[in-house]
Amino acid sequence: MGQTQTMVAEIEIQASPETVRSVFLDFSRYKEWNGWKVESSNSSKRPYELRPKDKLKVDLGTMKFSPTLLQNSPDAFEWHGNLWPIFSGKHEFKWQPSSKNPGGTTFRQKEDFTGLLAFLMAPGRSFRKKSLDNWKSFNADLKKEVEKRS
């Protein structure tokens, strides 16, 4: 049912992966440094307590949806948003020790899109460009906030 389209946005951050994860999971403070909103559908759960199959509420400014958490580990945070068979995406946020900057972190967002409308995320499509620009903006905001707090 259509091709898989993959998008990736990456940035180097001058702080440890643990620090990057800490700021990333501090959902309640997102409004202080960027326009995204991420929260658990279960308000009694803190971000570190979220487990696979938990539901999230996500507002990326350009899109609102309620994905299911796939992973919340020391290395990554991943969700699956689904309007199958129309559109489905697995979005991963990953922080790993940088191979470019000792003591730093490579922060990466990656999403695999499938479904009938996955072609909208193909290279050269405006929807892909808008989404990638939004991710890059989040990455830059995260970098600024992490380095400010470090």
Image (spheres, helix red, strand yellow):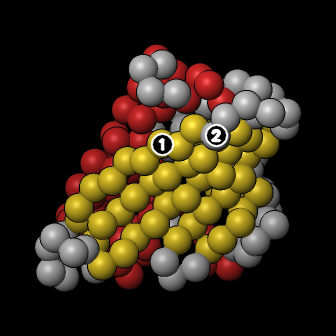
Q: Which residue lies under the disc numbered 1?
A: 7
Residue 72: x %, y % from top left:
62, 74
Q: Is residue 138 visible?
A: no
Residue 137: x %, y % from top left:
34, 40
Residue 109: x %, y % from top left:
45, 54
Q: Is residue 84 visible?
A: yes
Q: Quadrant of residue 92?
A: bottom right
Q: How far is mark 1 from mark 2, CA to CA?
A: 10 Å
Secondary structure state at the residue bearing disc 2:
loop
Confirm or deny contact between disc 1 and disc 2 (CB under 8 A). Answer: no
The image shows residue 22, relative to residue 136, as above or below, that is below
Residue density around tag 1, few if under 14, some if 14–19, many if 20 or more, within 10 Å: some
Q: In the shown orientation, is residue 134 left or right of residue 39? A: left
Secondary structure state at the residue bearing disc 1:
strand
Residue density around tag 2, few if under 14, some if 14–19, many if 20 or more, within 10 Å: some
* Residue at 27% over, 55% down: 11
* Residue at 60% over, 47% down: 112
Q: Which residue lies under the disc numbered 2?
A: 4
Q: How many marks?
A: 2
